[in-house]
Amino acid sequence: MGYLFGPVLSRRLGLSMGVDLLRHKTCNLDCIYCELGRTDCLTCGRGRFVPPQKVLGEIREKRNEPFDYLTFAGSGEPTLSQDLGRVVAFAKETVSRPVAVITNSTLLTSPAVRKEVAAADIVLPSLDAASPAAFQAINRPDPGLKIEEIIQGLKEFRREYSGEIWLEVMLVAGINDHEADLIARAAESTEPDRIQLNTVVRTPAEPVRPLSEEEMVRMLEIFPGAELIPDWDWRVPVDIRNRILDSLCRSPSTLEEICRLHDLTDSDAIKYCKILEHDGLITRRIEGGKLCFLGSKSRGRG
Ligand code: SF4
């Protein structure tokens, strides 16, 4: 069994090599929008879910593969692993790229967890609610968790940590958007470097409704200075799709080359490659230590 996965194309982190310290769906939340489905193991107890030596071995093996960030994420909430601090510390010594931790913020109430997470170069916590009712509705937490304490934990973490904090807020229509102003105030009070607004696009745990593009743009007035992770439009414009496919069928290209050749931002190139790869129209291989994309032999056009 592999504990590292990817690199995946991440709109927030570019090429991200994931590290998974958990068994499938181990979390202290059961978010209605979770792409992994319902939480099988709802727990607030930290434990050992995978053999740490094997994870360290895989980090050593894959340290020279092409990726921008080594990212602790995966099958649930990474801070539930009692090995997180040790593995992050090893990764920092072993890998020359920055180390990121994605967390649902809940265990940042613990000084010990804050210390472990603070060894990372960048931390991406999330905050989807500011009231107990919305917390219950969107995150369906373990009964011991209190949203006020979690917000306080994020503030403590900011005081102790000088690295980058990118706070993600997931907005779901009819579930937490009515208290966007409360969430915005809570998010600002935790003083992250960036606030990134997201909405549901991939197959979630429950049939929940995303905010429209217009509604998300309006959210920028409520969250001044925030940015959108504009993933709601899960399509590739036909002319761009055809240009990318034509060029990748002639010769493989890295993400940088795709950006340059087709005049795309990093974020759009990542999004389009993700979609084309998902649809089986392009594949990947490593060439000269770089990740390249190439056109699949049989592909449909339209
Ligand atoms: S915190 Fe993350 S892994 Fe846990 S239920 Fe929510 S979205 Fe899924």
Image: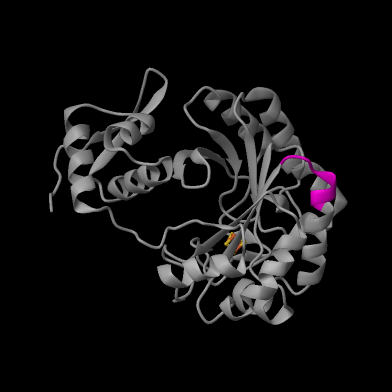
Q: Residue at x 60, y 70 (%)?
A: 222
Position in image of residue 155 (x %, y %): 81, 57
**Left or right: where 81 falls relative to 54:** right
> In the rendering, at what x and y percent does residue 9 appear?
43, 43
142 w.r.t. 13: above or below: below
Q: Is residue 217 magenta?
A: no
The residue positioned 70% from the left and 24% from the top of the image is: 93
Residue at horizontal 69%, vertical 74%?
182
Q: Position of residue 33 (x, y in %)?
A: 52, 68
Asked whether, in this view, residue 60 is left or right of residue 43, the answer is left
Q: Is 202 drawn above or below residue 263 in the view shown?
A: below
Residue 162 location (% of width, % of height): 78, 40
Ligand 1 picture quarter: bottom right
Which portion, as a residue range, is magenta?
157-163
Colour approach in the figure: one colour
**Count of marks, rendered view:** 0
Q: Is residue 146 visible?
A: no
Q: Which picture quadrant has residue 210?
A: bottom left
Task: Please identify the quarter of the rendering in which residue 136 is found.
Answer: bottom right
* Residue in the picture at 71% in, 49% down: 81
Is 63 or 149 nearer to us in this picture?
A: 149
Residue 272 visible, this orientation: yes
Q: Seen in the image, is 216 located left or right of residue 295?
A: right
* Residue located farthest toward the top when viewing the structure as drawn: 288
Work out whether 45 lies above or below 148.
above
Residue farthest along the right direction in this orientation: 111
